[in-house]
Image: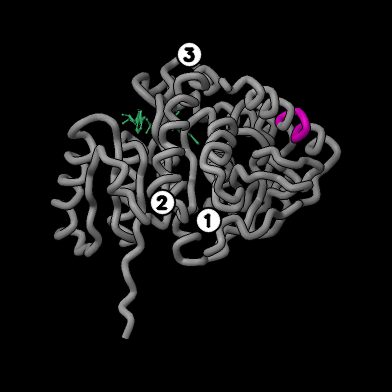
Amino acid sequence: MTAHKRKKIALIGAGNIGGSMAYLALIRELGDVVLFDVVEGLPQGKALDLNHAAPVLQSSVEIRGTNDYADIADSDVCIITAGLARKPGMSRDDLLATNAKIMKSVAHGIKQYAPKSFVIVVSNPLDAMVTLCQRETGFDPSMVVGMAGVLDSARYRFFLSEETGVSAASIDAFVLGGHGDTMVPVRSNTTVAGIPITQFVDGARLDEIETRVRKAGGEVVSLLKTGSAFCSPATAAIAMAESYLKDQKKVLTCAAQLDGEYGYKGLYIGVPTIIGCSGIEKIIEIELTEDEKAALDVSAKAVEELVASLPA
Ligand code: TXD
């Protein structure tokens, strides 16, 4: 009998999102977790606290904290939140220079110790950071993906649920493009139990909701004042990791490198993908209205400009 070895999840960055992901992995017994951070004691302290919760949860996975990349060796999944988070008044793009430097060091650690891992980038500015991570690791693009669309689509679904009184579980929505103000809520593919959303909400109100989706991250930052959203990003990133680890082949909107889809090649932007045991197994091209395609082109251009401004 070959016993199934537990999966191994490396969380690079043990801050708000990293700690929340570790907790979700523990509750859902997704696999053993290694929390990595550069701050001495932070990953170790969070790991110890979480291991104290394990007996109550009756969870059998182990969580370790470390400041040594060697401890992430042979991880199946690496989820990167290393970097600075926004403060009120800051844009995601304001984080570019600082987080790019951090991303380079993280990418080299992953390349050295977890060369076969599926890498999920969360750090902002997301589209530039996932591009840089793929470049610096040299991993196949199907194994390096950005977390944004799952979160942005969930925000859209939540606001539509509030508006319609229907459970968000019955609402399907897509938000494509860059993870920023140019993101594209795809109204034409948003449905309530398969019924077009336009049968439930009028156009003017949908405009307001879609504007709120684009600003939702900033809305949380301005309320929290000391950081950005962490429960919802953690939940979205873990859903992506789970689809990979369990070969669930879920359709999840992520920042993936396009190879001609939507008319782009080599660009990372948010698109519907199928995530399974081979990573990004397919990029789905959905029908867009002329306005939606034009909006996606604006978003793609914004990402191209951001990527072009990455320090060499
Ligand atoms: O949808 C999305 N993709 C976004 C992403 C949603 C929300 C937050 N978004 C971004 O995630 C946010 O703008 C940040 O760039 C990251 C992480 O957000 P988090 O809220 O977790 O930030 P924290 O709590 O500051 O944690 C970051 C950790 C912190 O503990 C640092 O010590 C650590 O990163 N850090 C590093 N870890 C490893 N290696 C290096 N070099 C390093 N530098 C800092």
| Residue denoted by label 2 | 114
Q: Residue furthest right?
A: 290
User: Of circles 1 and 2, which is in front?
Assistant: 2
Q: Amino acid at mark 3?
A: Gly
Question: Looking at the image, is 119 positioned above or below residue 83?
Answer: below
Using the rendered view, name the quadrant where residue 176 is placed. top right
* 297 in the magenta segment: yes
Residue shown at the point (53%, 56%) measured from the top left: 169
Pointer 3: what residue? 89
Q: Is residue 13 above or below residue 170?
A: above
Of 108 and 75, nearer the camera is 108
Q: Could you tell me if the residues under marks 2 and 3 are in contact, i.e. CB atoms within 8 Å?
A: no
- Residue 78, given in percent of the width and then of the height, sits at 42, 48
Quadrant the C terminus occupies: top right
Tell me the quarter of the picture where residue 102 sits: top left
> Which of pointers 3 and 1 lies earlier in the amino acid sequence?
3
Q: CA distance from mark 3 to mark 1?
A: 33 Å
- In the rendered image, residue 199, in percent from the top left (x then y), is placed at 73, 48
- Badge 2 or badge 3: first in the primary sequence: 3
Q: Is residue 36 left or right of residue 211?
A: left
Magenta-tinted stretch: 295-299
Q: Position of residue 88 (x, y in %)?
A: 43, 16
Q: Secondary structure at mark 1?
A: helix
Q: Residues within 10 Å of mark 3 (few under 14, many from 20)?
A: few
Q: Give the mark nearer the N terminus: 1 vs 2.
A: 2
- Chief SS of the magenta region: helix
Q: Residue at x 52, y 23 (%)?
A: 92
In this picture, residue 145 sits left or right of residue 291? left
Badge 2 density bin: few <14, some 14–19, many ≥20, Cα 10 Å: many
Residue under label 1, please give it.
169
Q: Mark 2 against mark 3, which lies toward the viewer? A: 2
